[in-house]
Image: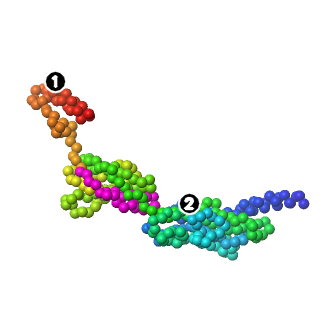
Amino acid sequence: MRSWLWPSLLLAPMAANAQSLAITLGNNADAGFANATECATVETVNYTATLTTSCSDLNVWATAGSCGNAPDAGDLTVGTVTQANLVTPANRSGFFQFTVSDLPLIDGGCGGAVEVNYTLCGAFQPPSFTGCVTDTAFVKAALSPTFRYDGVPPGVPTIKGVGSLDSALTLDLGLTLDTTQVTVQYRQAGDAGDGTWLKGGTFLTGSRVEVDGLQNAVTYEVRAQAEDGAGNDSDFSDPTTGTPQALLGFWDQYRADGGQDAGGCTQVGGHPIWLFAAVPAALSWLRRRRR
């Protein structure tokens, strides 16, 4: 009796542990998301079950709650493999699909400005060592992917200040934490242009951005729009104005601020004498500008 009983008891747990279920989103991802413009998007859910036989259907579903043994009322059943079909090994792996607009609990329908987090669940009931009994624990997906519907746009940016550069403007921005990138547009102010907003660039989040390729001494209106990780866009900020300015060289700026050359062509040691006279004046000018 002892010669076969102990090996049988050891093999039974090994057989039970052989049951498994794996679920991933398309491209084997473990997380996904959609925004308010992607309601018609079709998502794919892959499944692979390791089993010899099953005492129930294999269900895959999406829930805004937690994963149980089977879909609850209000959950979205993504797909089912019947108990009879699980007998065929080819049916133990494959994929199901769902449309984003079919997800439950999106207040006001898909496209609404809400955020809902879902879990993709899967489960089937294996036999016990004595066959199919109702109290046998279900085999659930080892990893339950998540899916987030995000229809809430980020906050509207604020332009805190505009700085002038040579053929460019800098914008100091105030952005909300959910902003992942910001787009800046510009146009000539007043009646100088045709009123068309032009794209000045799309930038990763940062408090300061630069728009270049502008004309000096021309006043521009600028505005900014934020985008979040789900692809939702905010409204544009209120426009503000700025004027690029040409940057003068050292001597041009020195003279523009009232600096005077000593004049004359006398040379000392091969250098014009006015250079020696101008250096102290220039240093004095620099000290004044630093104050």
Q: Residues within 10 Å of mark 2 (few under 14, many from 20)?
A: some
**Quadrant showing the N terminus:** bottom right
**Residue 168 percent location from the top left of the image:** 27, 50
Q: Quadrant of residue 84?
A: bottom right
Residue 90: tell me if it is visible: no
Q: Quadrant of residue 223?
A: bottom left
Q: Residue furthest right?
A: 1
Three-letter amino acid code at the position of disc 1: Gly
Residue at image location 69% in from the left, 72% down from the top? 56
Three-letter amino acid code at the position of disc 2: Asp
Q: Nearer the viewer, residue 291 or 85?
A: 291
Q: Quadrant of residue 94?
A: bottom right
Residue at image location 57% in from the left, 61% down from the top? 145
The reply to whether the magenta stretch includes residue 212 is no
Contact check, label 1 and label 2, Cβ < 8 Å: no
Sequence-first disc among 1 and 2: 2
Dot label at residue 162: none
**Residue 172 percent location from the top left of the image:** 34, 49
In the displayed structure image, the side of residue 173 where residue 167 appears, left or right? left
Magenta residues span 223-243
Dot label at residue 30: 2
SS at mark 2 in the image = loop
Q: Residues within 10 Å of mark 1 (few under 14, many from 20)?
A: few
Q: Residue furthest top?
A: 269
Q: Is residue 249 above or below residue 128?
A: above
The reply to whether the magenta stretch includes residue 241 is yes
Residue at image location 21% in from the left, 37% down from the top? 250
